[in-house]
Amino acid sequence: MAHPSRTYRLEPRGPFSLVNERQFFGDWLSHPSDPDAVVMAFPVEGWRGCAAVVVHQEADGPITGTVTATGDALPDEAWSQALASLSLDVDGAGFPEVGDRDRVIGGLQRQYGWLRPVCFHSPYEAAVNFVVGQRISMRQARALRTRMARDLGESIEVAGQTVHAFPAPERLLELGTFDGLPEEKLSRMRGIAGAAASGILDRAYLRSMPVTEALAELQRLRGVGPFASQGILHRGAGLVDEVTDDDVTREAVQLAYNLPIRPTREEVLAIAEAWRPYRMWSTVLLHVWLRRERGGPTRHPGRGRKAAA
């Protein structure tokens, strides 16, 4: 049962454009009477219910959000989760200073309108995404996740439409079969659901750990290797000052900085010192540039999953 909606307001710290975020990342539902707003639906961490959140940005910059929560989910927690998925839980006022120190990042900041990363609603949803997406296309994985939300998730009425949250961990724990998912993936998903229910995939918990420990913890989950663990941590927990260790980042750095050969991990980290404390935000800008302007990333036979990081 949905409870009365609650409205929140936030002044972004640092440059931010919701319209711009939608242009580059945009896999959100639309609001029927406000095309610039985005509608999210997700299980709220703690798993006591779900929420639908309508996020709108006023012309002068403030962000407003209308939260409709179900069950025992707390609207405040749902709002915080929505902000984290938009990287609005971070003070971005110092991000322009990175561009002042590094001309490459500065150019990309201006080119892409101070773009911030968009993250999954939770590390739990990120983990399921990476397991579902193994050995199938992104389009197929997206369609599967959408169908799982529609068939297994909670329905919420908001803005005159019905939205479907992704199924909560307890729902996946009891899931026997699902069309399009082989038993091995279902088994891995049940393991992820159990980890989420026990708190291992909590955003605050993962953020509190040293990165190496968090990655090791995630890789104990069945079906989660180095590629998936980085995705869960960086795109699920939403780390801000880290640099992914993958072929895409190295290729983007080589091309953007006109390096003669592909840089090593150590060379990437040396360049990224100028990006602190927003190294992940800068990395995302480089990834966007590589895909949109350079037709990358380059695929290497036998390394497709790592290159896709």
Image (cartoon, rainbow, N blue to C red):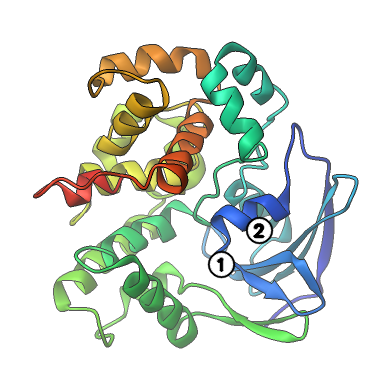
For residue 243, side relative to residue 204 (left or right): left
Residue for badge 2:
78
Give residue 77's position: percent from left, percent from top: 66, 54
Q: How many marks?
A: 2
| Quarter of the image where one finds residue 87 | top right
- Residue positioned 69% across, 30% down in the render: 91
- Residue positioned 45% across, 34% down in the render: 286
Q: Residue furthest left?
A: 302
Q: CA distance from mark 1 to mark 2?
A: 9 Å
Q: Are marks 1 and 2 in contact (CB under 8 Å)?
A: yes
- Dot 2 amino acid type: Ala
Please tell me whether residue 183 is drawn above or below residue 263 in the rendered image.
below
Q: Which mark is residue 42?
A: 1
Pick the quarter of the image with the N terminus: bottom right
- Dot 1 amino acid type: Phe
The first of marks 1 and 2 along the sequence is 1
Give residue 265's position: percent from left, percent from top: 26, 21
Q: Secondary structure at mark 2?
A: helix
Residue 269 visible from this viewpoint: yes
